[in-house]
Amino acid sequence: MIVFFQSLISGILVGGIYALIGIGLTIIFGVMRVINFAHGDLLMLGMYATWLLFKYLGLDPYVALVVTMPLLFLWGALLQKVIINRVLGALPQNQILLTIGLGLIMSNSVMLLFTSDYRILTTSYSSSSFSLLGISISQPLLYSFLVTVAITGVLFWFLQTTDTGQAIRATAQDRDAAQLMGINVKRMSVLAFGLGTALAGTAGALLAPTYYIFPQVGGPFTLKAFVVVVLGGMGSIVGATLGGVLIGVTESMAAVYVGSGLKELVVYVLFLLILLFRPAGLLGKSRA
Amino acid sequence: MRAPPVALRRPARGFSTPALLAYLTVIALLALVPQLTHKPSLLHLWIMVFLAISQGAAWNVIGGYTGQYSVGHAAYFGLGAYITMLLLEMHQVPPWYGLGLAMVGAVLLSVIIGAITFRLRGPYFVLASIAVAEIIRLAALDFRDFTRGAEGILLSGIPPLQLGAHLTIRFVGKQPFFYAALALAVLAVSSNWVVQHTKLGYYFQAIREDQDAAHSLGINPTLHKSIALAISAALTAAAGAIFGLYVRFIDPNIVFSLPDVSVQMVLICIIGGIGTILGPVLGAVVLVLLSETLRNPGWLVQVGVLGEDSTLVDFIEQRLSSAHVLVYGVLVVIVILFAPDGLLGVLRKGLDRLRRRPGASAAPRAAA
């Protein structure tokens, strides 16, 4: 039983980070209808930014968020304004390939700059853990989860109550209607891509103390982000949050009860089943 | 009013004799290459180009002509390589039978994958195709008893092929692989030709243009998508098999790779020109030359483009050898933003402009 709760807890903690990745992807999809295949590579940039700040300035990864988040927001906004904006009306296949290309450029530029060596960011608390009723909780994972909860809370507040947040949601609901109501949808797209990038980068920063850092780290996270988002329903932020936690728990349960080599396989099978039998996701409205 | 059966983006042209003659001449000239040069690095380059053409043209059948953007073709490539290599290593089945079995296996797999993924459209289809291929890669890594997992399969040797009483082909050196890869490339390009000009191919293209309209005109979309996928899968598996035999070592992360196989097959077509016969050929030549040059610029010296002590070779080897994927990325972004019809489209536009220039002979332009 202790094993069950142990894997449940660590699944939820990791799931929080997955949720953050998924929320970023779902905001981008919701507002722009673009499926961002470079999402994991944006996460990778967040990891490297955190690692560089830690290595050269000695900045703690969690403190460094005040730098990495705005930095990635700007990067995402720039990408949207200069490149992705040009394919907003294009075929979805072309949008997918464009973001795949951008992902390749990012991961390989990082590889040229920093080689493909695995980097490790070791903080004083990297391998320490709390013990609660016989269940050990990794310190960095717990901190990351708390940060995730805080960020998600702020994000909900921002989207629900502020004018800009409502404008973003309106654009996601109906781009044309939003434009007719006087919302600057182009600006909303830039904001949304910036926001999505910042969230992916934050997830990267939060993973940095517990994960290997290397240029190709993003690929699997891109796929995982899709699983999370499709599970929750494309465009639904609450769905992505729920989906992230569900995938985190599924993975950690599968690692214990099926085999650690098969945990990702289980997740992809689950993904296919959802695509086939509940394509709108758990919380999404049927659109297609 | 009776509507024409299908609406096509480009008016289909029938088999034209000059084009066919040109095609046969090129094949004949290419077949002479190993008689003219024995430089291994040059032959290697040709083999890689032929395999890339095969992969690109194979993907073109389902992606370019039928409009189903599968980003999971590594499943068939890897399956082809694994079936051939495992049969040869474990059961001493000669690879020319193994290759056939690999193609049959890929067709069977394509039926299963098609049954799952063809119910989905657009981005959901793309995601499902990736998921299926990743499931197969992870399974190949995990079921060690059967596939040897990440350890991979190292080929100990290929038995000689006895053709008739006098001709024995020994699989040493690069020459046999040159001809095998050339034959597959010809087969794959010819398949594109057939798809572009026959009724079956018109069905594919109708589904690409508007699946619902095609359906309402009596075309069974699922059936024809499955046929297109089966052709594509069989050719891809053959490319995987020849690749495995040629490099003599495979493991799941090489032949089932999402970025190096699945994505690359799409990129070949996108960069060259999707849904055209020459597009994958052009894309393959450009991509392979770029990536092989960045990975191993030595062939430039062997051909005589650069001198023995050229500093450029050192520079490339030291600084750019890991950048070949970066070049793909840049090319794809440029092509999608500025030349959605690929390099072939750019070439065609350039030729058109030349022809239209005042003073030049006013040749009648093909219907645009």
Image (cartoon, coloured by chain):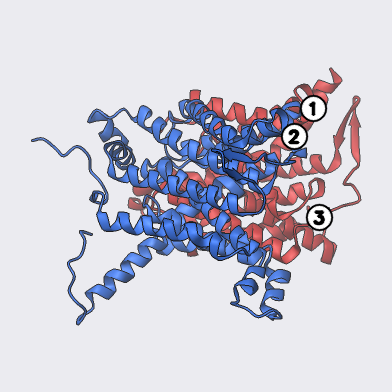
Chain colours: A red, B blue
Q: Residues within 10 Å of mark 2 (few under 14, many from 20)?
A: some
Find numbered disc 3 in the image and state the secondary structure of the residue it sits on: loop
Q: What percent of the width, then of the height, locates residue A189?
A: 47, 54
User: In the picture, residue B211 is in which quadrant?
Assistant: top left
Lateral position of residue B335 relative to residue B297, left or right: left
Q: Chain of mark 3?
A: A
Q: Residue furthest left?
A: B1
Q: What percent of the width, then of the height, locates residue B117?
A: 48, 30
Find numbered disc 2 in the image and state the secondary structure of the residue it sits on: helix
Residue drawn at the location 75% of the way across and 31% of the way down: A261
Q: Chain of mark 1?
A: A
- Residue under pointer 3: A119
Q: Are marks 3 and 1 on the same chain?
A: yes
Q: Amino acid at mark 2?
A: Gly
Q: Which mark is residue B149?
A: 2
Residue drawn at the location 61% of the way across and 40% of the way down: B161
User: What is the total number of numbered labels drawn onto the structure image?
Assistant: 3
Q: Amino acid at mark 1?
A: Ser
Quarter of the image for the C terminus of chain B: give it.
Answer: bottom left
Q: Nearer the viewer, residue B142 or B34?
A: B34
Q: Chain of mark 2?
A: B
What separation in Å lies between label 3 and label 2 (alpha carbons)? 26 Å
Q: What percent of the width, then of the height, locates residue B5?
A: 19, 37
Q: Amino acid at mark 3?
A: Arg
Relative to A213, say whether B241 is above or below. Answer: above
Relative to A90, say whether B80 is above or below. Answer: above
